Image: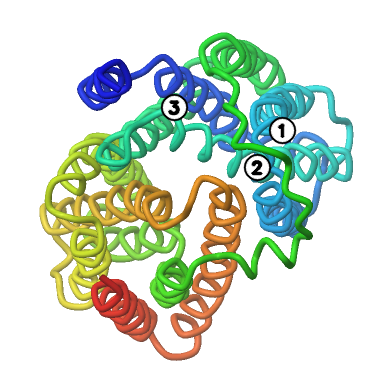
Amino acid sequence: MKTENAALDAKQERWLTRGILGIGLANLFSDWGHEAATSLLPALLALVGAPAVALGVIEGVADGLSSFAKLAGGWMADRPAWRKPVASAGYVLVGLTTFAYAFAASWPVVLILRAGGWAGRGAKGPSRDALLADAIAPSQLGRAFGFERAMDTIGAIAGPLTVVALVSFSGVRAAMRWTILPGLAASLCFLWLVPAAKSAGARRAVSFVGSLRQLPQPFRRLLVGVFAHGIGDFAPTLLILRANQMLAPQYGSARASALVIALYTLHNVVFAAISYPAGALADRVGKHGLLAAGYAAGAMMCGGFIFAPAKLTWLGALFALAGVHMAVQQALEKSLSAELLGPEIRGTGFGALAAVNGVGDFASSIIVGALWTAVAPAAGFVYGAVFMLAGAALVYSGR
């Protein structure tokens, strides 16, 4: 008994275990590679003579397959023996398909590669999240998921910055080929550092629908709040568009575009910097309240874009607030889910959470864009603020 207590105390004190470090590094390198490729995708499509609609088709099909793969991946992740193989295969598939963009001669080939890679990315997510939750004491779930989000975002910042340097002297396809290095590093970090899941007993002979039915009621209430927030949480590219519109009359189109890129970089830096502190704070003060506050920060950001003057300092503050909102949301939704779900059902729960977020993201950007076009930009931001506040209220009331 003393030995077990000592082991638990050591686990609680040492939150940065080998498994958590491995998952963090794998995410950093994986995002480094595929975000680099994503930033080059429009240029590659131009090289192969693809029409403008091709990019929308590619991203839409890839995102749709990813959402379905997340649900299926969640069901698979409830089999502990499958977690590491599924997640490992996902990292390998993302790395190889991203590298293969460099050899595509037509946009349908890019579509097949992107769809395959994003399906692998979606399928691996629940297994990776379940392995992360298994590697840490329940009292430290917030900091573990915050660390994972921070590492992921550092990779997302490094990717585009790297290709800016590479393209200037090597060209688009050579820069695409370079992505094999971070893709390989991600796979090796995961395979070498992350331990396999410990068996939770005999394999449960439960169907996919049966697994969904076993999700506990508190977690289902959380999903309602996550969905309410999600259908108001539009893509950050719309923030970029609005900032460009606000700054262009004062700075000119070219300079405004450069300033907006700097603002979006600030957004990502704040996102990376806040993720771990937000998770660690949630472990101390409670996750429901802090997640609700993060959602409310998103609503404040929407309000700011309605009333703020077209000044760089104001826009910098709003992009930073958007980074805080995203950091709290992404770190705490997963850590709170892990807290509410039993180990035997975590995979399905993580898959359901990812799918709900995916549907919300898809709907919100379309609705906000339609309101923006048909009425005014302010109408889209009002819509976003209302649903983010609704999500905050639902999450807070579900404590």
Where's the C terminus, which quadrant?
A: bottom left
Residue hosting label 1: 82
Residue 395 x/y as whole percent: 31, 72
In three-dimensional space, the C-alpha distance between marks 3 and 1, rounded to whole angstroms, equals 26 Å
Q: Residues within 10 Å of mark 1 (few under 14, many from 20)?
A: some
Residue type at numbered disc 2: Ala
- Circle 3 or circle 1, nearest the eye: 1
Residue 222 shows in this picture: yes
Q: In the rendered structure, which disc, 2 or 1, sits on the residue that comes first in sequence?
A: 2
In this rendering, would 335 be left or right of 47?
left
From the image, tell me which residue sits under label 3.
Answer: 155
Kind of residue at badge 3: Gly
- Mark toward the viewer: 2 or 3: 2
x, y (%) of residue 90?
Answer: 69, 31
Q: Secondary structure at mark 3?
A: helix
Upstream in the sequence, badge 2 or badge 3?
A: 2
